[in-house]
Image (spheres, rainbow, N blue to C red):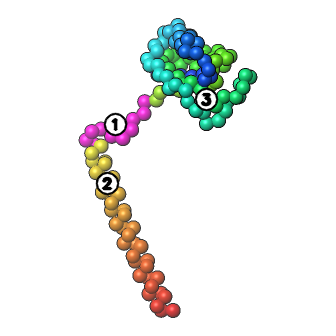
Amino acid sequence: MPLYDCMLLLKPHVKKEALMDLVAKVGKHVYRRNGVLADLKSFGTVQLGYGIKKLDGRYYQGQLMQMTVMTPPSLNKELHYLNKEDRLLRWLLVKHRDVKFGSDFLSEDDSKAELSKFRSNLYEDEEEDDDDDDDEDETDETERNKV
């Protein structure tokens, strides 16, 4: 089963009891699909980049929650009941990808060799560029003197 982040942006005036009720509702839905709630984070009240218009007004702040769940891929279609939830401003489901960065991408022996090549190429290019600029300046001066 893949790992997902479910981001919930709630209205700023929602009480903690109502917030936890909504999180429990989503968690039960995941559990019924043989999923697992791996992590739960609250980022508190956050300022939004733009106002989100709802029937009861425009909101410039929201309470941000992140639920990390391991569940079957069909969960995305099943979470659309959240669209009718009046406590939510927005929700988003993001799938984790197995992406490796830096030296994790290469094996240990290869990574040291590749990084050393990169360093040497980096400094060699700068020296060559400096030499080319000097040659161009000298030719410009000799052409000016001829004229």
Along the viewing direction, whichever of 31 and 26 lies nearer the viewer: 26
| Dot 2 or dot 3, earlier in sequence | 3
Counting from the top left corner in percent of width and height, residue 13 is at 62, 20
Q: Does the magenta portion include 109?
A: yes
Q: Which residue is mark 3?
A: 61
Query: Mark 1 or mark 3: which is in front?
Result: 3
Give the residues in magenta. Answer: 98-110
Relative to residue 82, is residue 147 drawn left or right?
Answer: left
Counting from the top left corner in percent of width and height, residue 97 is at 46, 29
Amino acid tagged 1: Asp
Relative to residue 13, is residue 30 drawn left or right?
Answer: left
- Residue at point 33%, 52% (across, down): 118
Query: Mark 2 or mark 3: which is in front?
Result: 3
- Residue at point 39%, 35% (across, down): 100
Secondary element type, mark 3: strand
Q: Which residue is mark 1?
A: 104
Secondary element type, mark 2: helix
- Mark pair 1, 3: CA separation: 38 Å
Asked if the residue under mark 2 is in contact with the one under mark 1, i.e. CB atoms within 8 Å, the reply is no
Asked if the residue under mark 3 is in contact with the one under mark 2, i.e. CB atoms within 8 Å, the reply is no
* Total count of labels: 3
- Residue at point 55%, 11% (across, down): 17
| Dot 1 or dot 2, earlier in sequence | 1
Q: Which residue is mark 2?
A: 119
Relative to residue 67, is residue 126 drawn left or right?
Answer: left
Query: Which residue occupies the extreme top position in the image?
Result: 32
